[in-house]
Image (spheres, helix red, strand yellow):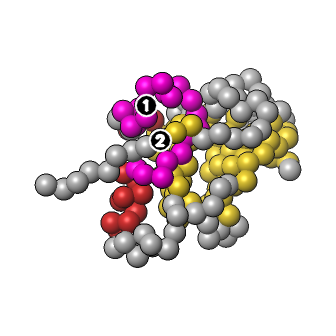
């Protein structure tokens, strides 16, 4: 019988003001600089939360619409549900990464799963270093408020 991993999610404590509560997914950018995830709060078009994983530090990520991950909340202790930011050192995703990489990195990297569960998307990132997180100012396009805002750092 195959031994299954046990998830050990905890709250991901982020040292920024106004970080608690629900967020909405805006966009994700994966390029030569790294992985950037942009989130916003409802009725807060003037700023975005930017979570940046530098290239070389993140190993893998999954971005899934929440309607397709019906058992995600089963993996998180009930007293922690309803938050946006979680992390884990032991998860199904980390086990899957080791399996598909034939355990090549298991003894070399201390991997953390950073999980961002927004109102519509569940984003899980495997990384060997903590991301950089900050609030950035935005400008809304003049033609339509339904378009994603332009971020200015």
Q: Judge whether 38 appears above or below 47 on screen.
A: below
**Secondary element at image label 2:** loop
Residue 140 seen in this snapshot: no
Image position, residue 146 (x, y; %): 70, 32
Quarter of the image that includes the N terminus = bottom left
Q: Nearer the viewer, residue 3 or 120?
A: 3
Image position, residue 49 (x, y; %): 73, 41
Q: Quadrant of residue 150?
A: top right
Q: Is residue 122 left or right of residue 153?
A: left
Q: Residue at x 51, y 61 (%)?
A: 111
Q: Residue furthest left?
A: 1
Q: Is residue 36 left or right of residue 87?
A: right
Q: Residues within 10 Å of mark 1 (few under 14, many from 20)?
A: few
Q: Quadrant of residue 68?
A: top left
Q: Quadrant of residue 99?
A: bottom left
Q: Residue at x 69, y 25 (%)?
A: 42
Q: Residue at x 68, y 29 (%)?
A: 20
Q: Judge whether 54 appears above or below 76 on screen.
A: below
Image position, residue 48 (x, y; %): 76, 39
- Report how far apart the C-alphas of labels 1 and 2 lie in the structure: 8 Å
Q: Is residue 90 magenta?
A: yes
Q: Judge whether 92 appears above or below 48 on screen.
A: below
Tell me the number on the disc at residue 77: 1
Residue 12 seen in this snapshot: yes
Q: Is residue 118 left or right of residue 15?
A: left
Image position, residue 57 (x, y; %): 61, 66
Which residue is denoted by mark 2 in the rendering? 9
Task: Indicate which disc, 1 or 2, sits on the residue closer to the N terminus.
Answer: 2
Q: Is residue 133 magenta?
A: no
**Secondary element at image label 1:** loop
State yes or no: discs 1 and 2 in contact (Cβ < 8 Å): yes
- Which stretch is magenta? 72-91
């Amino acid at each position: 019988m195959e031994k299954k991993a046990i998830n050990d999610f905890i709250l991901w404590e982020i040292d920024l003001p106004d970080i608690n509560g629900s967020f909405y997914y805006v966009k994700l950018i994966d390029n030569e600089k790294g992985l950037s995830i942009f989130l916003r709060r409802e009725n807060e078009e003037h700023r975005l939360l930017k979570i940046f994983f530098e290239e070389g530090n993140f190993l893998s990520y999954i971005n899934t619409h929440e309607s397709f991950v019906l058992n995600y909340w089963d993996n998180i202790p009930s007293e922690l549900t309803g938050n946006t930011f979680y992390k884990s050192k032991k998860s199904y995703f980390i086990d899957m990464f080791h399996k598909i990489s034939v355990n090549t990195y298991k003894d070399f990297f201390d991997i953390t799963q950073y999980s961002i569960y927004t109102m519509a998307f569940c984003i899980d990132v495997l990384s060997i270093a903590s991301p950089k997180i900050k609030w950035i100012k935005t400008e809304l396009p003049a033609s339509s408020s339904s378009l994603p805002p332009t971020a200015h750092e």
